[in-house]
Image (cartoon, grey):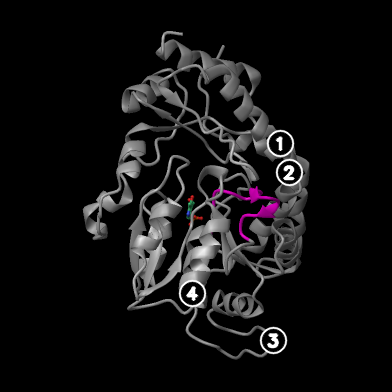
Amino acid sequence: MINRVPFVDPKRIYSLLKNELDAAYFEVMSKGDLINRGQLQSFEKNLAEYVGTKYAVGLNSGYDSLHMSLRAAGIGPGDEVIVPAHTFVATCSAVVNVGATPVLVDVSKDFNIDVNKIEEAITQKTKGIIPVHLSGYMADMPRIMVIAKKHNLVVVEDACQSLGSSINGKKAGSWGLTGCWSFYPFKMLGGYGDGGAITTNDPDVALFATRMRYNGEERETGEYHGHGFTCLLDNLQAAFLNVKLKYLPQWIIRRKEIAQKYYAALYHIEDLLLPNYSKPGFDHVYQNYTVRSKQGNVFSEYLKSKDVEVLTQFRKPYYKHQELNLVDRGFPETEALSREVCSLPMNIEITNEEFDYVINSVKNFYGK
Ligand SMILES: Cc1ncc(COP(=O)(O)O)c(C=O)c1O
């Protein structure tokens, strides 16, 4: 008997890893190792190794990783930065909060920035571009890197939803000046509170972030190297993330299996567009399984009424929120998909019974 199918269930992951997470907690607490200790350094080393970069620097959140990256790149007032029209608002807010101007570009059918529309948005003032790898599937980085090189743009990857994803084996977060990561609890690698990091191959960027996350201070000398921020990844969170990172490769395999099962069960429903793509070399790790239903809200509300927890990010595109003061240049694909998006439960803790219940609920809606 199904009561409710949660979108994700952190309690189940905790019970799965209880011994290791409890041990990590006791280790940190009994030694009082709270700020910038071995667990943080070890997590940074493991994350950099996993992503394939020389450095990783732990920060407070995904937002902070974007903000820090733009600061490290020297982007500020008078500069323009290209961002996708369909993303979490933090991608854009980081640009606004360093004093630069975001220039929005529409997305394609895969929810990521439409590479064919980037060059028409570039002006004399454009300094950077933030491709977002949404839902576990990467933006077309080979083409974006060519455009960036041609126009001398800094590339900051918003990889917050795509840890482990890759194109031709090269991982998300290893292409641009930085890769930006969020360990918000519901991410594939989620902490137990906010958390984030940047990955980079640039020693100056790594040093800048290492100092600026700690109010600009060089820990060894006490010298301030600029007006910084308080945005260090907690040692306790790093200890938990270190435990979970080991399991990520097997969790990604499980997510891909679930995506295949969704596809096998639902591909024949004409009014439902599924996120199972076949672009050669592009690997999908399915942070989210976001379908497009022609029936939009009627579909998502029906699933909610059946106690299937779904997300509809983002019914109202962020640039339509008046107080954000953004320029809507007309983004037809973003408008269309915003009406139709519905993310079905996608997590490694879902039971077979729950999965079947979701499938049956979708099929019942379509009378199949
Ligand atoms: C695409 C994207 N960018 C940025 C963020 C911001 O991350 P955080 O919530 O850790 O600040 C998120 C996470 O929610 C995200 O999904």
The magenta region covers 158-173
Hey, what amino acid is under mark 4? Asn
Image spot of residue 95 (x, y percent): 39, 67
Residue 109 located within the stretch drawn in magenta: no
Q: Which secondary structure lies at badge 1?
A: helix
Q: In the rendered image, which residue does mark 4 sit on?
A: 152
Q: Given contact means CB atoms under 8 Å apart, are the residues at marks 1 and 4 in contact?
A: no
Question: On screen, 78 above or below 249?
Answer: below
Q: In the rendered image, which residue does mark 1 sit on?
A: 253
Image spot of residue 68 (x, y percent): 51, 71
Which of the two marks, 1 or 4, is nearer to us in this view? 4
Asked whether 151 or 291 is in front, the reply is: 151
Residues at marks 1 and 3, CA–CA distance in whole angstroms? 42 Å
Q: How many marks?
A: 4
Mark before the other along the chain sequence, 1 or 4: 4
What residue do we see at 42% from left, 8% from top?
367
Residues at marks 2 and 4, CA–CA distance in whole angstroms? 35 Å
Mark before the other along the chain sequence, 1 or 3: 3
Residues at marks 1 and 2, CA–CA distance in whole angstroms? 7 Å
Q: In the rendered image, which residue does mark 2 sit on?
A: 249
Q: Which secondary structure lies at badge 2?
A: helix
Q: In the rendered image, which residue does mark 3 sit on?
A: 220
Hey, what amino acid is under mark 3? Glu
Mark before the other along the chain sequence, 2 or 4: 4
Mark before the other along the chain sequence, 2 or 3: 3
Image spot of residue 136 (x, y percent): 57, 44
Which of the two marks, 2 or 3, is nearer to us in this view? 2
Dot 2 alpha-carbon crowd within 10 angstroms: few under 14, some 14 to 19, many 20 or more: few
Residues at marks 2 and 3, CA–CA distance in whole angstroms? 36 Å
- Residue 195 in view, yes or no: no
